[in-house]
Amino acid sequence: DVKVTQSSRYLVKRTGEKVFLECVQDMDHENMFWYRQDPGLGLRLIYFSYDVKMKEKGDIPEGYSVSREKKERFSLILESASTNQTSMYLCASSLSWGRDLTDTQYFGPGTRLTVL
Amino acid sequence: ELKVEQNPLFLSMQEGKNYTIYCNYSTTSDRLYWYRQDPGKSLESLFVLLSNGAVKQEGRLMASLDTKARLSTLHITAAVHDLSATYFCALSSSYSGAGSYQLTFGKGTKLSVIP
């Protein structure tokens, strides 16, 4: 079974702090993704990566950056946390497009971040 | 820009009844996904639909895809309490040249099945 793990289930930070959210997958997937989920807004893509050291902006990248130094690990960084970044953050991974038409994205358990 | 619209957003139904969740989308897409999310948990993949007329079933859930109408449905048959969850549809758009793709999600349908 695919396993996607996230470093913390719950996190509380103060405004202005630098925050790191870590995600690790164990299935040798090429693609990794970071989403945030807010009530009434569904899931929105922040950043994704299709290879080591490669990254692309999603729909809402402002205030975030990412790092992918190893294939299995994808980090989301909040350079200076703000209260409007309080949210549930979900990491996902998948195979490369076309390798398996029925492939899906596999999600981690989520990190609920509160910024005070 | 791909837009995905689900309705209803909230659904309260009695056990034993049937109902359908609708997912409309704005532009053509290669794949359509249905996910389930239990309260406080992450998303679990239910179905991947690839082509027009595709139908997939698992237990009391059946998903179908009509690419001409840009519509997918998730039909619930004889609902039971265990089906209470939020259901999301999502569509993929490929990121050309890099083997990656993005998913655009609907806002989700929160289903409550009442005994």
Image (cartoon, coloured by chain):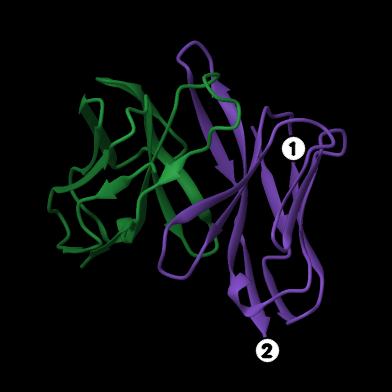
| Of callouts 2 and 1, the N-terminal one | 1
Chain hosting mark 1: B
Q: Amino acid at mark 2?
A: Pro
Per the image, the residue denoted by label 1 is B26
Query: In what element is the residue under mark 2?
Result: loop
Per the image, the residue denoted by label 2 is B115
Q: Amino acid at mark 1?
A: Ser
Query: Residue B22, image x and y in percent?
Result: 77, 55
Q: Is residue B45 above or below residue A27?
A: below
- Name which residue lies at 51% across and 32% down: B102
- Name which residue lies at 59% across and 74% down: B82
User: From mark 2 to mark 1, how far is it between C-alphas?
Assistant: 36 Å
- Of B78 and A105, nearer the camera is B78
The dot on residue B36 is none
Chain A shade in the render = green
Q: For mark 1, does the 10 Å Cα neighbourhood hold few (<14), some (14 to 19), or many (20 or more) residues?
A: few
